[in-house]
């Protein structure tokens, strides 16, 4: 299943795993504000995320995706 991991480091590390197709959290957790930013970013870059997923499945390096500004 195409997915990506989002990491947020504070006093305790947070990791969320998100479905690329549905843009929803599958596992883990992030603080609420950070999760909203991750979901907004993923909606904007859904095609790029899916392309990178397919690239990584072929053991090729992913292409950098612009951060949310």
Image (spheres, helix red, strand yellow):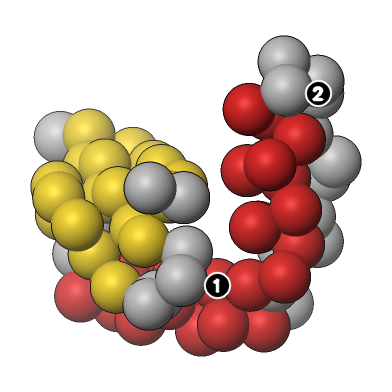
Drawn side of residue 8 relative to residue 53, left or right: left
Q: Residue at x 67, y 83 (%)?
A: 44
Task: List x then y, in percent, for residue 64.
Answer: 82, 44
Q: Which residue is mark 1?
A: 42
Closest to the camera, between mark 1 and mark 2, is 2
In the orientation shown, which residue stands out farthest toward the top? 59
Q: Earlier in the sequence, mark 1 or mark 2?
A: 1
Task: List x then y, in percent, for residue 54.
Answer: 68, 42
Element assignment for label 1: helix
Q: Which residue is mark 2?
A: 61
Sort mark 1 into few (<14), some (14-19) or many (20+) by Cα contacts within 10 Å: many
Q: Quadrant of residue 48?
A: bottom right
Q: Quadrant of residue 42?
A: bottom right
Answer above or below: position of 16 versus 38.
above
Q: Residue at x 46, y 50 (%)?
A: 2
Element assignment for label 2: loop
Answer above or below: position of 38 versus 65.
below
Q: Is residue 69 visible?
A: yes
Q: Residue at x 40, y 75 (%)?
A: 23
Answer above or below: position of 54 versus 31.
above
In the foreground, 58 or 8: 58
């Amino acid at each position: 299943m195409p997915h990506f991991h989002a990491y947020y480091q504070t006093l305790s590390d947070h990791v969320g795993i998100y479905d690329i197709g549905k843009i929803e959290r599958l596992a883990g957790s992030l603080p609420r504000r950070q999760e909203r930013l991750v979901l907004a970013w993923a909606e904007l870059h859904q095609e790029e995320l899916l392309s990178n997923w397919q690239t990584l499945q072929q053991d090729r390096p992913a292409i950098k995706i612009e951060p949310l500004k």
